[in-house]
Image (cartoon, grey):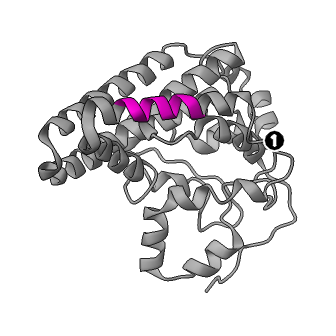
């Protein structure tokens, strides 16, 4: 039974695969385009989540079970789709201007309640350039996480349920990243303003719905599992894995993850 991280001295395969793919199929470049309509999806999900939060606020805490159910069946998919949009904005795949992409990422980040878009933008690009390198790649769990969870199934379930909290402990170990800058401050200010507005107009019951949706979208939920399956495989020769199932459409084709790393 594997009890430690698998170590390999080989280079990551994606740069070589990208060159081979483009050489054999140059027409693939036609797929490497921006899609400004993605911004409309982000705004629509923001409005949907805010409207549901308002509705749950009207019902009150007595209907927390309804809030939990809607968050699992609807909200998690909405928030997860906006996470994908944050990811696309990080790669400047929505607009040509990096600033416009950052603004869309911040808008998509609002239903998550916590400011994560600009921090993600900083460390995710390192994930591509230094995939699998412990001091550069935030997708790798901390060593202490691995020791804490071990091979226990129920600890793994708890770890996934609390995945957002474990994720924020990883960037401090990374090299050559600057988390706090002007855009992070804007992200933080927008998140605080949105949170205050939700509490004021939707009440704490509405705010709780968004908390549920956030935790499911990146935690113990089918879409939450995507955060670990895309790089945690049983084949030591393949670090990146794709998903082509029915949820892929709701995830805005994020399942094409191996392809994304080949041609980011």
State whether residue 125 is above or below residue 69.
Answer: above
**Closest to the observer: 248 or 26?**
248
Rate crowding at label 1 as few (under 14), some (14 to 19) or many (20 or more) other CA atoms within 10 Å: some
Side of 49 where 137 appears, left or right: right
- Residue drawn at x 33%, y 36% is 199
Question: For the image shown, how many numbered marks are present on the structure?
Answer: 1
Q: Position of residue 128 (x, y in %)?
A: 75, 43
Under circle 1, the secondary element is helix
- Residue drawn at x 59%, y 36% is 117
Q: Position of residue 155 (x, y in %)?
A: 47, 77
- Report if residue 213 is visible in the image: yes
- Report if residue 229 is visible in the image: no
Side of 198 where 113 appears, left or right: right
**Closest to the observer: 6 or 150?**
150
- Residue drawn at x 85%, y 55% is 11
State whether residue 111 is above or below residue 36.
Answer: below
**Closest to the observer: 261 or 101?**
101
Q: Position of residue 111 (x, y in %)?
A: 41, 35
Side of 264 where 188 appears, left or right: left
Which quadrant of the figure contains the C terminus? top right
Residue, far bottom: 1
The answer to whether residue 120 is magenta is: no
State whether residue 131 is above or below residue 33.
Answer: below
The answer to whether residue 196 is magenta is: yes
Which quadrant of the figure contains the N terminus? bottom right
- What predominant SS class does the magenta segment belong to? helix
Residue range corresponding to the magenta coloring: 188-197
Q: Residue at label 1?
A: 15
Q: Position of residue 52 (x, y in %)?
A: 24, 33
- Residue drawn at x 65%, y 84% is 3
């Amino acid at each position: 039974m594997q009890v430690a991280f698998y170590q390999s001295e080989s280079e990551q395969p994606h740069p070589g695969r990208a060159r081979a793919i483009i050489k054999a199929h140059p027409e693939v470049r036609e797929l490497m385009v921006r899609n400004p309509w993605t911004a409309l999806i982000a705004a629509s999900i923001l409005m949907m989540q805010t409207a549901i939060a308002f509705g749950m606020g009207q019902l009150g805490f007595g209907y927390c079970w309804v809030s939990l159910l809607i968050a699992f069946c609807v909200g998690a998919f909405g928030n997860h789709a906006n996470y994908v949009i944050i990811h696309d904005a990080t790669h400047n795949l929505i607009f040509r201007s990096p600033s416009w992409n950052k603004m869309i990422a911040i808008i998509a980040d609002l239903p998550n309640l916590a400011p994560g878009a600009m921090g993600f933008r900083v460390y995710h690009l390192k994930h591509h350039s230094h995939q699998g390198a412990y001091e550069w790649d935030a997708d790798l769990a901390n060593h202490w996480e691995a020791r804490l969870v071990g091979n226990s199934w129920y600890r793994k379930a708890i770890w996934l349920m609390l995945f957002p909290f474990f994720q924020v402990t990883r960037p401090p170990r990374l090299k050559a990243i600057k988390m706090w800058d002007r855009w992070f401050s804007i992200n933080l200010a927008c998140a605080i303003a949105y949170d205050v507005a939700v509490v004021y107009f939707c009440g704490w019951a509405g705010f709780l719905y968004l908390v549920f949706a956030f935790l499911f979208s990146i935690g113990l939920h089918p879409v939450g599992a995507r955060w670990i399956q895309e790089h945690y495989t049983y084949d030591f020769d393949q670090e990146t894995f794709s998903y082509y199932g029915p949820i892929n459409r709701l995830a805005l084709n994020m399942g094409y993850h191996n392809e994304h790393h080949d041609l980011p």
